[in-house]
Structure formats: C-alpha cells, structure tokens
Amino acid sequence: MEINLVKLAVLLPLMVPAMLAAASGQSTYIPYELGGDNYYTMQGGPDISASISGTDEFGRGDTVTVYLDLTNYGRILGFKEDQTPQNPKEYALAASELQKEYSKPTALGITATLSSLSPQIEVKSGDQVVESLKSGDKTKEPLQFSIKIGEHAPAGEYSLQLNLSYDYQDNVRVYATKLLSEGGVQSLVNYRESYVYQKANQSVPIIITVKKEADFEILNASGILSAGSKKEEVSATYRNIGEDPIRDAVARLSIFKPFSSTDDQAFIGSMQPGEEKTVVFKIDVDSDATPKEYGINSEIKYTDVYGDTVISESMKIPVTVKEESSSLLLPAIVLLLIIGAVGGYWYKKKKKA
C-alpha cells in the first residue's frame, strides 16, 4: 500500500488533458531489440522555438551573419497507464520506467537548415547541428547562418524559414528477472531498458528587416572617346531608387589607364527618393589606348539622413574608345602631294631654262 501511495503522489501532477506535440513526417524506429514491460505511455514531446540573437536589421547589398537561439519548450502533457504493477518487482520496474519516460521532451540530433522565401535573400551557409536540447533549455551558443542581401533589395521585412529535424524518445520498456533485497537495499536483477524513438520535423519562421537608406542606379551613361583625345565629355544620369533622401552628394570616378582626368568629380547636391540628376566628367585618353569597350567605375559620396558620410556601391559607366582620329592626316597628305608636284614643276622648268 505504501508503494501505491508513492506511485500516486508521483503521477497525480501529470493528470492533465492528453495532447500530442505537433510534428510532421514522423516515423518510429527502435535502435535496440524491444522487450520488457510498458507501464506508462507519456504524452508530449519536444517543441522547439527559434529567435534571432542580436540585430535583425541589415543593410542592402551586405553579406551578414544571422545568429539564432533555439529553445525547447516541449514538456510532458499527460500520461496513460498501460499496465498496473502487481508485485514489488513490478512496482520497482514501473518506478524506474517512469523516471526514464520524463526524457521524452528532449530533442536529439537536431539538424537546422535555413532557407529563404525571397529571391532578394540568399542563404550561403549549410546545415547546423545541435547534439541535444532538453526541455526548458536554450542552445549554449547561437547557430550562425551567413546570408547575402540583394544589392537593390527594397527596405522592409523578409521571411526566412528554419527547418528542424530531430529524434526524440517516444516510449520506454523495462525488464528484470527478479527483485533482490539485501541490507535494506533493493536491486533489480538482469535489469534492462528498451527505447522507442520518433523522428520529427518542425518549421520555424524567421523575420529579418532590410533597413531604409538611399540607393542608386545609373541611367543613360555613355561616352564615345578617341584614342589620344583630351577633355572628352562623359555624361551619366543617377537616380535615387532608395527610401531616404541625401545631401551634399558628389559623383566620383575611379580612373585607370588608358584614362586620366583632372575633372573626375561632379557635384550632385541633394536628391530625393526617385529623383534623377545628370553630371558630366571630362576625361583624357592615352594615344596608345586599345580601341574597345571599357567600364569606368563611379560612386556617390553623400551625407545621409543621420548626418553620416556614406559612399555608395560602385556603378559602371560604359565608354567606347575608337581609333585615333585621322581627320588631319588626309589634308596633310594632299598638301605634301601639292608641294611635291609644284616643286617638281619648278625643277623641270628651271632645268629647261
């Protein structure tokens, strides 16, 4: 009778409505030979949540690390008594099984995979693995996933999905040949346990934010230059496609051979979202420049809404270099021919005289 009272005292707090933890794609497997008695079936299981550790706001065009904490909110929700103990050995087995059954909410061998639901976000990291996570515990260190945000991703919220797969203990069976009592200490002879496991999957939504800021694209940029030319004009139209205005903006070129310039900056001033402004640069071209298509890098240095100085991503201005102009060559040849002809005429005339 005393053992019955102890058993009831232990189990009474567990008598709550039975519920099963939601998990899709489950399958049962038994790693060891199943044997013994099953006195209780616990109801419940792991329930893993994920949250961002640190900032969830990032800039467009950046490759960043998202830190995720996993927390296991799973618990025992109820129980079912499958077999009633009939003797001291069975009471001892039932008590031992009950202790092991409390491990059911522990998630084992967690594999976490982050995926993006938007083409603007690229997940660059592979799977992350957590060995185990007990009920009520949080991962000691956050999981780390590298993501690349599109260069012109609009500001706002973006959805990611963290897919979790793991195992958990579903049931325990116990066995012993007999119960020994020696010196007031009881022990089960040939005691063994058998475990039944389940596989489970969960999907947890993760939300990140791309912050508002100015952003630019280049329009109607072109230049047709001749090898050896000086102070050739190259124009470019910039548009603010971001969400914030800018001020004190200056467009700058990154000049490389065969180009040079003493006028590689152009003042833009202020630009509102959606506004366009055209600037003109003057460029010199080396005389030995290879005729072909080139791309000259440009950028905008500006002051943002917070008063910080910012330099934009690089934008290419396409230019075409043609062969050195031959417009003066033909007149020079004609002039030489005329001089030669006149000289020959006067030479013959003088010789006859």
Image (cartoon, rainbow, N blue to C red):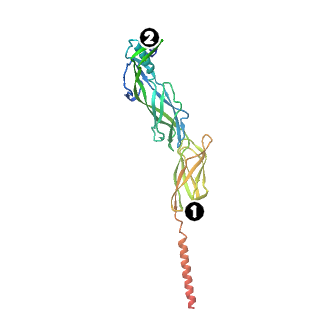
Q: Position of residue 187 (x, y in %)?
A: 44, 16
Q: Is residue 149 above or below residue 20?
A: below
Residue 351 in the figure: left or right of residue 49? right
Q: Is residue 70 above or below residue 229?
A: above
Residue 286 is labelled as: 1
Residue 314 can be seen in this image: yes
Residue that mark 2 sits on: 3
Residue farthest to the bottom, as pictured = 353
Residue 19 can be seen in this image: no
Measuring 48% from the left and 28% from the top, which residue is drawn there?
A: 133
Q: Position of residue 300 (x, y in %)?
A: 58, 48
Tell me the quarter of the picture where residue 166 sits: top left
Measuring 61% from the left and 53% from the top, which residue is drawn there?
A: 265
Which of discs 1 and 2 lies nearer the camera? The answer is: 2
Q: In the depicted view, which residue is nearer to us: 331 or 76?
A: 76
Helix, strand or loop under label 1: loop
Residue farthest to the top, as pictured = 1
Q: In the depicted view, which residue is nearer to us: 213 or 57?
A: 57
Locate the N terminus by quadrant. Answer: top left
- All told, the count of numbered labels is 2
Locate the C terminus by quadrant. Answer: bottom right
- At label 1, the amino acid type is Asp
Q: Is residue 170 above or below residue 273?
A: above
Q: Position of residue 325 (x, y in %)?
A: 53, 66
Q: Position of residue 328 (x, y in %)?
A: 55, 70
Measuring 60% from the left and 55% from the top, which residue is drawn there?
A: 264
Residue 295 is labelled as: none
- At label 2, the amino acid type is Ile
**How busy is the neighbourhood of tag 2: few (under 14 within 10 Å), some, or many (20 plus)?**
few
Q: State how far apart marks 1 and 2 are (Cα).
A: 100 Å
